[in-house]
Structures are given as C-alpha cells and as structure tokens.
Amino acid sequence: MSNENPNFLTPNSRPAPQTLGEFLIDNQSDFPFASGELTRLLNSIRLAAKVVNHNVNQAGLVDITGAAQNINVQGEEQMKLDVFADVTFINTLTNREIVCGIASEENEDFIVVSGSDGGHKQHYVVLIDPLDGSSNIDINAPVGTIFSIYRRITPQGTPCKIEDFLQPGNMQVAAGYVLYGTSTIMVFTTGNGVNGFTLNPALGTYYLSHPNMRFPEKGNIYSINEGKYATFPQGVKDYLKYCQKEEGDRPYTSRYIGALAADFHRSLIKGGIFLYPQTSKAPTGKLRLLYECNPIAMLAEQAGGKASDGEQRIMEVKPTELHQRVPFFCGNAKMVEDVEGFIAKTKKVKAKA
Ligand code: AHM
Ligand code: MG
C-alpha cells in the first residue's frame, strides 16, 4: 500500500528520544531483583527532583515577588531550600510506600517507614543528600541531590534497623544524582552502566541525553578546594605539585564548583579527578561516606573510573555510623591511582623515619 495518503504516517527515520519512564520500563528486567519495586522507587525520586528543580529555579525570585508569599497560610516562614528539598524527598518516598526506611544528611537519625497497613513489607532503604552544595544557591551556581539505594538486610515485615543503612557501598543496588545546573539532569546506575536523562522543563519529562556514560580515556582536570592546601597531607600536596608541573600532558587544568554532583559531572564528561582529602582540622575529611561518597563511587566505577579514600576502595569501607566522613578521591582511574601512589610514598617515607 502506498503512503501517498497524507493520513498514512510512517515513523521518522530518526528514532524518538527515550524518556526516563520508558527507559525504566524497558530495562526493568535488568534491575537487581526485578520486582518493579526499584522502578517505582526511581520513579518517585525523579518526581521529587522535579518539584525541587522547580523551587531551585525560583531561588532569588521569592525575595522579589514573594513578600506576601514568604509566609504561608499557617503563618510559617518560607522554608529554606535545603529543608524544602529534604521534606519533599522524604514525603514523596514515604507517601508511596516504596521504602522501609530513609536516612538523610539533613537529619540526625534515620526514619522508619511503615505501610498504610502498619506493616513493613518494603525491601529498600534510601540514603539521600537532598540538596548538596546548598551554599551555591545564593550565587546562582549548580547544586545537586545525591542518592543511594540498598536492599534491607533485616527481615522483611519488621521495622528497618541501623544495620540496613550501615552497609558498605559495594552492596548498593542503585545510586545517582540530580544536577540542577544550566539544565537539570538525572544520572543514575542500577549496576549496568551509567545513564543521564535531561529534564525538558516545558514538558516535565526527562529524556535519555547521555546514554552509557564513561570517563574519557584520559583526564586533565583536577578539582579541589586549594585554599586548604597548607592543611593537606604531604602525599596530596605532592600530587598537586605533580598536576601543576609542566611536563608531558601537564600542567592539568584546575576547576572547582564546590558542589560534588557538579564537580563529579564535569570529571565524568571531560575527564578529571575530584579530591576532598583529610585536613589537619578535619582528620577524616568533610564528605559523608553514606550520602555522598558511596553513591558517587558506584557511578564512578560503573563509568570506568575509581573512587578511593587515598588507600582503600571507597565502596569497601565498612560504615560504623550514619554521618561518617571520609577522605575522597574520585575520577579517571589513572588519576586516582596516581594520587594513591603519592600518598603511599609519603607513608613509606614516614614508616622508614
Ligand atoms: P553540603 O552537603 O553541606 O552542601 O557540603 C558538601 C559540599 C560538597 O558538595 C562539596 O564538594 C564540598 O562540600 C565543598 O566544601 P568546601 O566548601 O569545603 O570546599
Ligand atoms: Mg552534602
């Protein structure tokens, strides 16, 4: 039959871009345990992220247009964005009965979630940094949400316990971040590579814009708060001098946004290393193992990179407390190996002395 009839439509030669919803359905069978629960959980995270995105994009406007709106009907003051993000993620996940527990960087303790029937039949716990790098809000620079998902180890049907959250990173079933930047992108892994979905704000739909993300072969950007140089361990100082030396493909370029999701995203796309070492004032570093380092480490490894605390693979560190901090070095495999080499060298020298 000819298709001269204008009502006879044939698909365009260009395939339609895949939406995040379609991707989740198409790939559900590849997800660990493939019961549909994880798909629903990721769906809820994408929804909460849209709400947070909407508010992040209005930052600054509220002060101009919102004199009256700053106080809501209950007479409460407008929430700060990091608190708003925290509440949004917790409510979205709790109301859908898809997790048995949530731990957030914003809250001291974890939250036990029970179903509307009072039971605890859900399998997953979520750990989240709802608005990472929130000091960037005031200067219109990127911020992110970072999340990590584990399957509970305590029996289904009982309230979740602290041990469900204190699992090493290599037990994560999924991890990701949402970066609220020049555009909003959700990047995640379920252990089968890393994919990025950009939000079309007009439609409220995320499209697969960055399939199968991998670090470039070589990286030449280092990312660190160099103002703290004097307080870094000698091995890190030596590595930074190496980065700056004019030799071969060096000096490397230095870039620092001050929001982990944004600095990591750049490293992943352009090739580079992100460093947040221990300092003399903060001997275990600043970043949180469970909310920031483990999820970013899983993404890094899934994209062909590495993540280390300077000596050990991040995802093998055994957590002992919810808000534990660790030194963090993450990015192109070779760059992470190089900094580990410099750290090991100074350790050997110290041991000899
Ligand atoms: P936050 O969770 O309180 O926002 O802090 C975490 C952020 C990371 O995103 C970023 O890499 C780091 O803190 C920046 O810290 P600094 O200002 O010390 O360079
Ligand atoms: Mg944070």
Image (tube, helix red, strand yellow):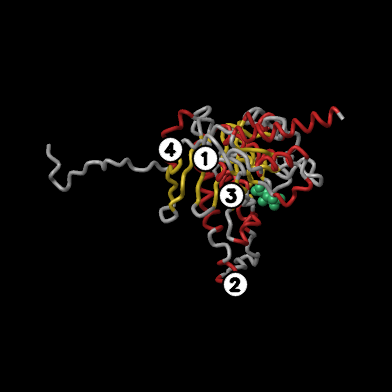
Q: What residue would you read off at disc 4?
A: 23
The label nearer to you, 1 versus 4, is 4
- CA gap between label 1 and label 3 equals 16 Å
Which numbered disc flags the more N-terminal residue, 3 or 2? 2
Amino acid at pointer 1: Leu
Amino acid at pointer 2: Ala
Screen quadrant of the N terminus: top left
- CA gap between label 1 and label 4 equals 11 Å
Screen quadrant of the C terminus: top right
Q: Nearer the viewer, residue 241 or 166?
A: 241
Q: What residue would you read off at disc 2?
A: 67
- CA gap between label 3 and label 2 equals 27 Å
Q: What residue would you read off at disc 3?
A: 144
- CA gap between label 2 and label 4 equals 42 Å
- The residue at the point 56 percent across, 57 percent down is 56
- CA gap between label 1 and label 2 equals 36 Å
Amino acid at pointer 3: Gly
Q: Are marks 2 and 4 in contact (CB under 8 Å)?
A: no
- Up the image or down, 60 lies above or below 298; here it is below
Element type where label 3 sits in the image: strand
Element type where label 1 sits in the image: helix
